[in-house]
Image: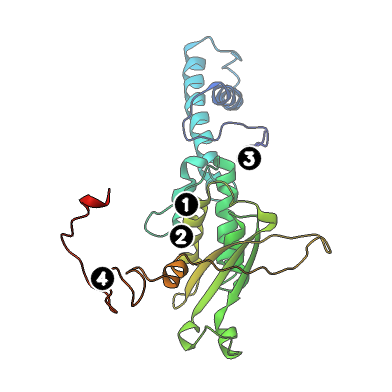
């Protein structure tokens, strides 16, 4: 593989210069440098293999030069967002996007996280427009997303809105056919809010609404209305709890309280 050119077959791109893959690359690079150093010697140095002391010294130099070259190649690759090693992915890419070291809670692997960061950067440089806001939500949710700028509804004098809503936009996330919220919904909601604080215009506010909706085949639903009211107080209103009105056992025309009356002879 040419020097300072990314090898597409390479698997290990970590910052640690260890492992079988690195050792193989080191041996191949050191051998190439060793051959070059031998060719620089005058003709009276005739050894072409490692044996004499000077070849051992040259081989040690070649190994260290090879180690340095491999390190420089990795550093050169860290310049690009798409080739930066995962060990430095946040320090080179993530800090450009997220505020105060706050990262979204995700289960992405290294390459998925790289693609996620690149998508966020692309959205960021689109500007604080509705398409960018929708793009943020689409990173975490696959359901239908609608972004509404409430100031447009205020201009149309939609009921329930007034001038206080002119700097508000609403995000409606629709779940079709009665399906439940996507898995890990709470983390997704927190991630969306984190990114919206980065993408949205600084003077705006937002609300997120998760809406369940059901669809029914045409003609299979009959629209009817049934209404019934039941109130147990009604029976109490029909009777007089104090006895028979204007009639009692003492012949009084109005209710009279009887206290300590002896009823022992009634049994």
Locate residue 69, reporting x and y percent: 52, 35
Q: Which residue is mark 4?
A: 250
The location of residue 31, given as percent across then percent down, is 59, 22
Given residues 200 and 40, the one toward you in this image is 200
Q: What residue sits 56% from the left and 68% below the top?
A: 229
Residue 144: give x, y in percent of width and height: 67, 61
Q: Is residue 150 above or below residue 260?
A: below
Q: Which of 29 and 176 lies nearest the eye of the viewer?
A: 176
Q: Residue at the far front: name it.
A: 265
The circle drawn on residue 6 is 3
**Residue at image mark 1:** 104
- Residues marked 2 and 1 touching at CB (< 8 Å): yes
Rounded to the nearest whole Å, what is the CA distance between mark 1 and mark 3? 30 Å
Q: Nearer the viewer, mark 1 or mark 3?
A: 1
**Residue matched to label 2:** 194
Q: Is residue 64 left or right of residue 245?
A: right
Q: Circle 4: is it few (<14), some (14-19), or many (20+) Cα within 10 Å?
A: few
Camera-side mark, 4 or 1: 4
Q: Secondary structure at mark 1?
A: loop
Determine the CA span between mark 2 and mark 4: 81 Å
Could you tell me if the residues under marks 4 and 1 are in contact, i.e. CB atoms within 8 Å? no
How far is the residue under mark 3 from the one under mark 2? Answer: 35 Å
Q: Nearer the viewer, residue 259 or 159?
A: 259
- The crowd level at tag 2 (other Cα within 10 Å; few <14, some 14-19, many 20+) is some
């Amino acid at each position: 593989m040419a020097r300072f050119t990314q090898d597409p077959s390479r698997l290990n791109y970590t910052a640690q210069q260890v492992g079988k893959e690195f050792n193989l690359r080191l041996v191949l690079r050191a051998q190439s440098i060793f051959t070059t150093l031998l060719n620089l010697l005058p003709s009276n140095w005739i050894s072409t293999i490692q044996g004499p002391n000077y070849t051992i010294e040259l081989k040690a130099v070649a190994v260290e030069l090879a180690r340095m070259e491999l390190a420089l190649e990795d550093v050169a690759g860290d310049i690009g967002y798409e080739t930066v090693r995962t060990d430095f992915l946040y320090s080179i890419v993530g800090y450009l996007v997220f505020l105060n070291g706050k990262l979204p809670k995700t289960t992405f692997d290294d390459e998925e996280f790289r693609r996620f960061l690149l998508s966020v950067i692309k959205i960021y440089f689109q500007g604080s427009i509705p398409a960018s806001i929708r793009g943020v939500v689409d990173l975490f949710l696959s359901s239908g997303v609608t972004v509404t700028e409430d100031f447009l509804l205020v201009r149309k004098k939609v009921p329930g809105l007034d001038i206080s809503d002119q700097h508000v936009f609403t995000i409606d996330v629709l779940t079709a056919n009665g399906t439940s919220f996507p898995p890990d919904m709470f983390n997704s909601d927190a991630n969306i809010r984190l990114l919206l604080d980065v993408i949205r215009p600084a003077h705006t506010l937002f609300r997120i609404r998760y809406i369940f909706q059901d669809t029914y085949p045409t003609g299979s639903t009959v629209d009817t209305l049934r209404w019934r009211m039941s109130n147990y107080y009604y029976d109490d209103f029909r009777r007089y709890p104090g006895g028979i009105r204007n009639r009692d056992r003492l012949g009084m025309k109005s209710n009279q309280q009887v206290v300590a009356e002896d009823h022992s002879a009634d049994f």
